[in-house]
């Protein structure tokens, strides 16, 4: 009898054990599924690691100013076009975002250039932010170039832009930035936002050429031309059709510096757009496409003058290769611009002091804090960037004391052709890799905040 009872108990215990196996398996599976996300959160909390100073979360997303979520812009004139508001159908094979490593990332080293110290300015990404955003930047402690009593830097803290504006962000990159530590940090980001598409040897050999004071100062000749002025006054000229018959040429040329970009046709349009070019912004791709697409309007290449400086917006290694070849008067080593003779885009007598190059941190910073478009939440996030004109205008906002913007898109843009030199009306083109509507809204906001003076017909 006892033996039968003992057997029953054993059978009952076995039954209970077998019954609990599914429960144990479900618990184990749940732990296994949640563990990777906890690890990612931990890595993001640690990003970017030792050597970075931390700041409060100063960035906040502004309300989407667009009527719809169409990805847009056509300022560069070379990308696949979309027709809003039809659904996106562009097929692009984009690379995967850079993975955040679990190990700590090397911090920035103090640079030893004149009047320049290095540190890193960061904001810890929110857990919901994808790692590719990279809202951490190199910071340069450089003294102001002027003593302007009412410059942009003194006014921006009193505006809504004070929470996102970094007055120590490096606008330009130069020889001292080409270090192993900085390469490891910036190789996480593709395209113009970092060095993921650039090998270390090309980086060093190119940036080592930019080793004069003229290469790391936007206004390298200000001391010679200031004429006692306390403020750097800049005219930033886009190519928009709003400038046609504007008669703004004289006003533009009165500024201390005149910025232009891409297919800036000047001859024959001086009365509307002026004749001077102090700083010309472009990428190798936009330059080549402008020479092809706007040749009929008279565009033959970058403007030549004694005062003109050439500011590369590096999208790929081809920009570094072209800049090095042009500055050293040697052939382009490889890539689409490979040549047997030195490039002639900038004239045969151009010197290295004429060249500058935007820093990837600056491009990523204005994307993250000023132009965080809907495209960053889509599969097109790796090709989205601010338009070349937007980079130029925001670079002026970060370097000039006073900024007047001409030829940029305004809410009545449909009343004007795409470019001021168009012989017939062409509507503004919209493309997947920029967001012109968001940029248009930003120009309005900067204008109403008193940080720029935007030319508008209405």
Image (tube, rainbow, N blue to C red):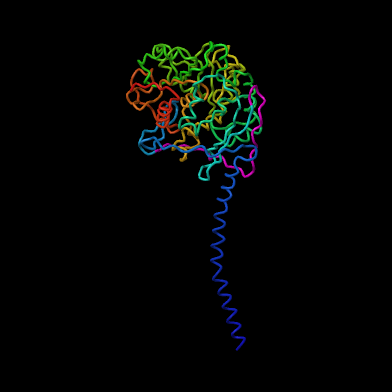
In the image, is residue 96 part of the stretch drawn in magenta? yes
**Residue that protrudes farthest toward the bottom in the picture:** 1
Please count the marks in the image: 0
What residue is at 36 percent from the left and 34 percent from the top?
84
- Residue 243 coordinates in the image, percent (x, y): 38, 18
Which span of residues is magenta-colored? 88-116
Taking the image as drawn, is residue 206 in sight?
no
Taking the image as drawn, is residue 428 in sight?
yes
What residue is at 58 percent from the left and 44 percent from the top?
45
In the image, is residue 7 part of the stretch drawn in magenta? no
- Residue 222 coordinates in the image, percent (x, y): 56, 15
Magenta stretch secondary structure, dominant: loop
- Residue 160 coordinates in the image, percent (x, y): 45, 32
Quadrant in which the N terminus appears: bottom right
Quadrant in which the C terminus appears: top left
**In-image side of 259 versus 115 (left or right):** left
Quadrant in which residue 181 is drawn = top right
Of residues 448 and 315, which is closer to you in this image? 448
- Residue 397 coordinates in the image, percent (x, y): 49, 24
Above or below residue 132? Residue 19 is: below
């Amino acid at each position: 009898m006892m033996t039968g009872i003992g057997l029953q108990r054993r059978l009952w215990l076995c039954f209970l054990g077998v019954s609990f196996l599914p429960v144990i398996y479900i618990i184990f599976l749940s732990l296994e599924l949640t563990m990777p996300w906890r690890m990612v959160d931990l890595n993001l909390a640690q990003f970017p690691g030792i050597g970075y100073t931390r700041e409060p979360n100063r960035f906040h997303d502004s309300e989407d100013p667009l009527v719809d979520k169409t990805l847009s812009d056509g300022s560069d004139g070379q990308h696949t076009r979309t027709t809003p508001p039809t659904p996106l159908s562009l097929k692009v094979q984009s690379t995967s975002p850079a993975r955040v490593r679990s190990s700590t990332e090397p911090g920035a080293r103090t640079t030893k250039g004149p009047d320049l110290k290095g540190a890193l300015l960061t904001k810890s990404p929110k857990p919901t932010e994808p790692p590719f955003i990279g809202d951490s930047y190199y910071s340069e402690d450089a003294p102001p170039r002027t003593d302007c009593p009412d410059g942009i830097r003194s006014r921006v803290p009193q505006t809504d832009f004070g929470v996102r504006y970094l007055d120590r962000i490096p606008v330009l990159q130069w020889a001292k930035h080409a270090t192993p530590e900085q390469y490891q940090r910036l190789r996480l980001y593709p395209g113009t936002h970092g060095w993921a598409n650039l090998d270390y040897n090309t980086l060093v050999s190119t940036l080592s050429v930019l080793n004069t004071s003229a290469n790391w100062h936007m206004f390298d000749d200000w001391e010679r031309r200031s004429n006692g002025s306390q403020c750097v006054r800049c005219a930033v000229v886009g190519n928009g059709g709003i400038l046609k018959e504007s008669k703004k040429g004289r006003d533009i040329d009165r500024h201390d510096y005149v910025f232009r970009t891409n297919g800036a046709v000047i001859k024959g349009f001086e009365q509307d757009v002026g004749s001077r070019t102090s700083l010309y912004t472009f990428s190798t791709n936009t330059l080549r496409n402008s020479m092809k697409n706007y040749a009929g309007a008279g565009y033959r290449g970058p403007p030549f003058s004694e005062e003109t400086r050439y500011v590369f917006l590096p999208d790929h290694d081809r920009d570094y290769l072209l800049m090095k070849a042009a500055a050293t008067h040697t052939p382009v080593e490889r890539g689409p611009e490979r040549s047997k003779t030195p490039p002639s885009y900038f004239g045969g007598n151009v010197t290295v002091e004429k060249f500058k190059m935007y820093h990837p941190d600056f491009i990523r910073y204005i994307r993250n804090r000023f132009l965080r478009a809907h495209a960053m939440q889509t599969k097109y996030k790796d090709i989205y960037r601010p338009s070349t004109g937007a980079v130029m205008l925001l670079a002026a906002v970060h370097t000039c004391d006073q900024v007047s913007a001409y030829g940029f898109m305004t809410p009545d843009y449909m009343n004007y052709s795409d470019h001021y030199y168009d012989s017939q009306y062409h509507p503004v083109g919209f493309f997947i890799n920029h967001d012109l509507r968001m940029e248009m809204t930003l120009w309005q906001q900067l204008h109403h905040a008193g940080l720029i003076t935007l030319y508008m017909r209405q």
